[in-house]
Image (tube, rainbow, N blue to C red):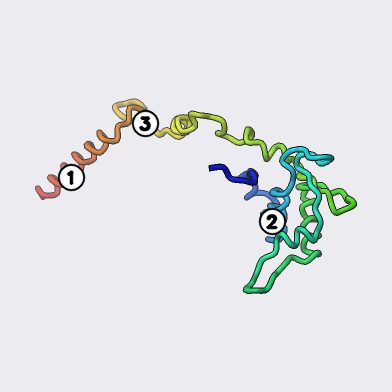
């Protein structure tokens, strides 16, 4: 199944960034900007840039309480954009029909190759090797994932359970 509209990548580093300490309106506007900037060059705009106007942002981010339409104020939007600019997350330039917003480091964060574990067909095998626990058995370390057979493991646990029952019944 293909999903229309494309996607954006969100790094888990976002949780430790300055934007997470900003007001909710700023966080929502940040995610809105990430979704709306160009993912490839278009006309005179580069990748990671787009033209925005406050009224469009307000309308796109509206919500309803019953039948009442609620919106961020123009001041909320302006303050949020200022915070993002001061936090070195975006760069703004005035344009005839609004504001050109450029997301700084867009190419770094929106490139799947920069994320650990991508493009590896054998990711599960590598994870298993990286996180493999070892048991100390008969004087040497043994990888517990080597030659692991779930059926044999089940039988071994059943034998241990039966031994335990015999010991308990003898007492």
First along the sequence among labels 1 and 2:
2
**Identity of the residue drawn at 74% across and 65% down:** 72
Q: Nearer the viewer, mark 1 or mark 3?
A: 3
Nearest-to-viewer mark from 1 and 2: 2
User: x and y percent of residue 160 in the render?
Assistant: 20, 40
Secondary structure at badge 3 equals: loop
Q: Residues within 10 Å of mark 2 (few under 14, many from 20)?
A: some
The one of 86 and 93 positioned closer to us in this rendering: 93
Alpha-carbon distance for marks 2 and 3?
43 Å
Q: Are marks 2 and 3 in contact (CB under 8 Å)?
A: no
Rounded to the nearest angstrom, the CA distance separating label 1 from label 3 is 26 Å
Task: Give the total number of marks visible in the rendering.
Answer: 3
**Contact? badges 1 and 2 (CB < 8 Å):** no
Question: Where is mark 1, residue-wise?
Answer: 164
Identify the disc placed on residue 145. 3
Are there few (<14), some (14-19), or many (20+) residues within 10 Å of tag 3? Answer: few
Q: Residue furthest right?
A: 96
Query: What secondary structure is marked by label 2?
Result: helix
Q: Residues within 10 Å of mark 1 (few under 14, many from 20)?
A: few
Q: Residue at x 65, y 69 (%)?
A: 64
Name the residue carrying label 2.
Answer: 27
Based on the displayed image, in which of its 4 quarters is residue 137 positioned? top left
Q: Residue at x 44, y 33 (%)?
A: 128
Residue 86 spot, x, y in % from top left = 80, 51
């Amino acid at each position: 199944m293909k999903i229309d509209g494309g996607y954006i990548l969100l790094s888990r580093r976002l949780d430790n960034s300055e934007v997470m300490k900003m007001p909710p309106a700023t966080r929502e506007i940040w995610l809105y900007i990430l979704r709306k900037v160009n993912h490839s060059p278009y006309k005179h705009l580069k990748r990671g840039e787009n033209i925005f106007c406050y009224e469009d942002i307000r309308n796109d981010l509206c919500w309803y309480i019953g039948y009442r339409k609620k919106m961020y104020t123009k001041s909320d939007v302006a303050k949020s954009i200022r915070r993002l600019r001061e936090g070195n997350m975006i760069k703004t330039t005035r344009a005839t029909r609004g504001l050109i917003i450029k997301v700084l480091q867009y190419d770094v964060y929106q490139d799947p190759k920069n994320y650990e574990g991508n493009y590896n067909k054998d990711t599960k095998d590598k994870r298993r090797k990286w996180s493999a626990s070892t048991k100390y058995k008969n004087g040497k370390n043994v990888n517990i994932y080597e030659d692991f057979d779930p059926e044999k493991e089940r039988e071994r646990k059943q034998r241990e359970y039966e031994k335990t029952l015999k010991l308990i019944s003898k007492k």
